[in-house]
Image (cartoon, helix red, strand yellow):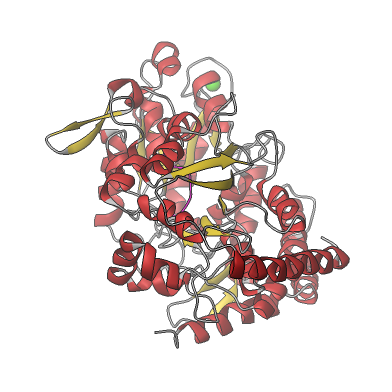
Amino acid sequence: MKNYNKVLIATAVLALTVACSKEKETGKMSTSNEPVKLKFHYHSNNRFTDRDKEGKLLPVFQIGADKSNVILESISNPVAQSSPQEFQLQAAEGFPADIYGGAVLTPEMQKYGLQGAFLPLNDLIEKHGPNIKKYLDSNPEVKKALTAPDGKIYTLNYVPEGTVARVYYIRQDWLDKLGLQMPKTTEELEAVLIAFRDKDPNGNGLKDEIPVFNDKRNEMIRLVNLWGARAYGNDSYAVRVVKDNDGNYSHAWLSEDFKNGIKNLARWYKMGLIDQEFLTRKENTARQTLWAKENTGGMTHEWVASTGNYNSHKELKKTVPDFKIVGMLPPDTIKGKGFEEHRRIEVKPDGWAISHSSKNPEAAIRFMDYYFSPEGNRTINFGVEGVTYDMIDGKPVFKPEVIAQNSVNVYLQTNFGAQLPMGYVQDYEYERQWTSDIANEAVDTYKANKVYDGVKMTPVISFSTEEKAAYDRITQPLNMFLDEMVNKMLVGQMDIDKEWDAYVAEAKKLGADEIVAVYADAEKRLANIK
Ligand code: CA
């Protein structure tokens, strides 16, 4: 966004803030039992809104509205392609809805909150949000993460449960067929991948196997972990500032370890061990294409539950009856014990907030509070009782037709609104019920082998106005530059040894050191919040 746009937005927000505070003095809200009308704008991951295909409010939101005596009117744009863009359009209009929500939007909400465009929630929670209050009081770490530099809370975020997120999966049926052992080091893994490439484990007489693939190009870069390097600070691909064991921050993509990791990945690419189409393949299609359709994929690093479910994939069971993937522990590297960098972060940058333009913030917080009640928590995690789940012995249990879906979370999100990222606490039981035995085994093995020990995460921090401005100015151009260069290195269009110093120098010119300082400063400040 150009600077003049920001000025325009700031002016619009300011004008509305003034108009609004005047209205609040005169228009005291009704205290009768009449339902209160609230406007709602939800947009997430560029594809989900608060409405179904027919434009009807999704059941999970409807239930929350009914329970909190609210008439919820969606003003989301069901055909919008980009959640951040849609949010900026709302900003330009001065945030006319009462409640805003979505994925990866809370840093923006906090930024606008500090400018007065979203309401501080502390007093509202204290007076009208008993369930939220109870949760935050008993989870001070979450409360701290949500608190902005001015000591106020502007957003309620999504809090995931459990630790294990993405894991390595490898074809056990191929290992068996070729008489190979599960690799325990990166060196052994390389030997296995060469065998996958050369020995026709899919048995079609063609050398068509793709030993390593990923659903996302960014996930391919993470494979530098196999040579002991870090790639991402937490589970956002934009965060490349990492924290070491002494608590010091640095830029992962400029380290010597990263350079070595990329050199090895480039070597693997040249050897044909890595998907030759990884730069051009459509995101989120590789598992479906290279397993279910073509049976050519060997190993990947992806979400533990959804990936494990390929073992019971309906098409695959028919076409490749022996198909079997199992979790593989992170192999030991040249630097030491194997580790897993990716895990669920404590608080996600997903959630919701109340606009300064809301005339009924008490009703808005009451609606949001519902999802922190035991019943509301069940609704947002499991959907609609009698439709998606039944209560059995006092516990929600998914109906078999829900468990049978190829993608349970997308099914729940699209049709019911359950599991959409917003302000609530995830119940891991939701995922455990549709997680296969093999995936649960991977979860247990990862935990038992302490693969997360010594891998610190860069926390989600509420930045100050200055920090956020620096973050916004630097992140996108810097990451674009890094992506472009690293892509060239990986596919052999750049001499890594020769060009590395120039690459680092240019990254520093684009603000790499400054972005590291933003995190270090923000965390120092965070330590002082009580
Ligand atoms: Ca083959």
Main SS, magenta residues: loop
Q: Residue at x 65, y 57 (%)?
A: 263
Bounds of the magenta span? Answer: 418-423
Q: x%, y% of residue 395?
A: 18, 38
Left or right of 379: which side holds 510?
right
Choose top left, top right, bottom left or bottom right for residue 340.
Answer: bottom left
Quadrant placement of the N terminus: bottom right
Q: Nearer the viewer, residue 134 or 515?
A: 134
Quadrant placement of the C terminus: bottom left
Q: Residue at x 56, y 34 (%)?
A: 51
Question: On the rendering, which quadrant does ligand 1 occupy?
Answer: top right
Is there any visible trace of residue 370 in the rendered image?
yes
Q: x%, y% of residue 369?
A: 38, 55
Choose top left, top right, bottom left or bottom right for residue 425.
Answer: bottom left
Question: How many numbered markers are drawn?
Answer: 0
Is there any visible trace of residue 181 in the rendered image?
no
